[in-house]
Amino acid sequence: MQLTAVIKHCKDVQQLQQVHAQFITTGLLRLHPPHILTNILHSINNFAVTTADVKSSSAAVLSYAISVFNSISNPSTFCYNTIIRAHTLLSAPLSALGIFARMHKLSVPPDFHSFPFALKACAQLRAVWTTVTIHSQVFKFGFVADLYVVNCLIHGYAAIGSLTDAYWVFDESPDKDVISYNTLIDGFVKFGDVVRAREVFNMMPVRDAVSWGTLVAGYAQAKQCKEAIELFCEMMNTGIRPDNRALVSALSACAERGELERGKAIHEYIKQNRIRVDSFLSTGLVDLYAKCGCIETAADIFESSPDKSSFTWNAMITGLAMHGHGHLSLNYFSRMKEAGIPPDGISFLGVLVGCSHTGLVREAQKLFDEMESVYGVTRELKHYGCMADLLGRAGLIKEAMEMIKGMPTGGDAFVWAGLLGGCRIHGNVGIAEKAAEQVMELKPKDGGVYSIMANVYASAERWDEVTKIRRLMDANKKVKRIAGYSLIQLNGVMHEFIAGDTLHPLTDEIYLVLNEIREHQFETC
């Protein structure tokens, strides 16, 4: 018992190795070899959790764990489980499965921990057939009725994308708990199938905060923000305390829909319940207020956040860019670098958008040129698209064309559309025609390009081409006319309007007021 206590009191691997060395030199290891080594192995496993993110430390800890395991004569099931878990924690799943196979070959009986650790290794490798093999062994050894093992099987199949198999295991299990349902919902959400996730959610006899939070997150990730907010409100009405995942997802959905008042209510709930605002929550709050135009509030929350991640910085930079604060977005970008946070692709996209909206061409070109050479951030099509838009807005049409010609993969629809927008502003018909041709080829169903070209020709008073482009659009049945829409919140109710629709219950009253405004304008003129 005293030896076990000494091992347990070790604070790190180095201290454990020192104790291990003392046991060898004093001869204690010879007196109690299996007992001491098993406890040392167990302690190494615990330290593996804290070193899993550091590659150099992970390799040293794993090497030590293997040497201890190999020193144990006739290792028990517990020892095998411990070393397999250490390998999964330290990102060595292939070796973990090799040890699991050796365990089976030596007829060491598995228990209800053995299979979950092996399944975790399969998930890390996305090894479908190995997962199926372990599933068959679960049957063979009689663990198919063990709820913990069954839940790990559901998770294992879901993690590798075999959601049909995950659902089959779930459906065939006679016993299901809330973890069974939550695991399946999470699997569907991660692979973007929110419909199936909702079906499982509706089947649940009992739901907890994880159930609600996972589905709210699923709706938010799928950009079904209205559904995310409605589900969150339903959750709050049931009296279940939302976890941080639900709060962050609801804030994100409010930010996307511009539902500032709803977002403020969530913020107030966080303050009243003294919920700790971690980097994820602070990012969600900054994102909400910045996207809704409350820049000062967003900045206050940002500055008061002690733990700013790259996501928090990006939310602030992007929010400033959206509302035309190009100089401020550049300022925050500089501060981000000074704080030791390396900018990523989103950081650059945000600051380039800010430069585009403010006309900061030189600053944008400098950052764009330095992306790969100085910062090591790969230029993506969206960055090229933003630069095409920026150069086009500034009237630098030829420069934009040269940039597109120099792209390694050629321009996509958004890059050419950015150039086309600049041509519309500055009346460059010739390049507009080239850009429109590229957009039509890449996105043949996009009706927007036809409308833009009609405006370009109309500005140049080339009426024959205006008629021709409109007839071409009408003749092409595959072309979709994407209607614009707007949102406005009034007395806590969000009203959505689609261009030309008559679906709103107060349509007659709205058009009556619009007609009166129009008549008043004519009278004023």
Image: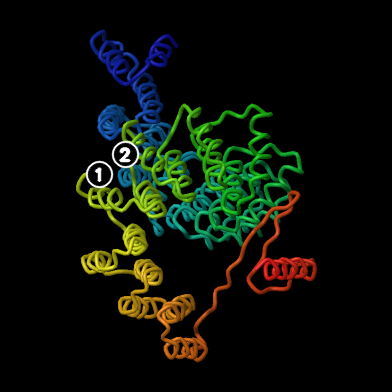
459 over 107 or under it: above or below: below
Q: Residue 176 in the image: x percent, y percent?
A: 65, 49
Residue, disc 2: 342
**Residue at x-position 40% and y-position 72%:** 424
Nearer-the-camera pick, 380 or 58: 380
**Residue at x-position 32% and y-position 19%:** 33
Residue, disc 1: 375
- Circles 2 and 1 in contact, beta carbons < 8 Å: yes
Nearer-the-camera pick, 408 or 9: 408
Q: Alpha carbon of mark 2 to alpha carbon of mark 1: how far?
A: 8 Å
SS label for mark 2? loop
Looking at the image, is mark 2 or mark 1 earlier in the sequence?
2
219 over 333 or under it: above or below: below
478 over 217 or under it: above or below: below
**Residue at x-position 62% and y-position 62%:** 486
Q: Is residue 125 visible?
A: no
Q: Is residue 419 visible?
A: yes
Q: Left or right: where does residue 148 sit relative to residue 310? A: right
Q: Residues within 10 Å of mark 1 (few under 14, many from 20)?
A: few
What is the tally of numbered marks visible in this picture? Answer: 2
Hey, what amino acid is under mark 2?
Pro
Hey, what amino acid is under mark 1?
Tyr
On the rendered image, what quadrant is the C terminus found in?
Answer: bottom right
Nearer-the-camera pick, 216 or 377: 377
159 over 395 or under it: above or below: above
On the rendered image, what quadrant is the N terminus found in?
Answer: top left
Q: Residue 477 in the image: x percent, y percent?
A: 52, 88
Q: Residue 478 in the image: x percent, y percent?
A: 50, 85
SS label for mark 1? loop
Colour style of the rendered protein structure: rainbow
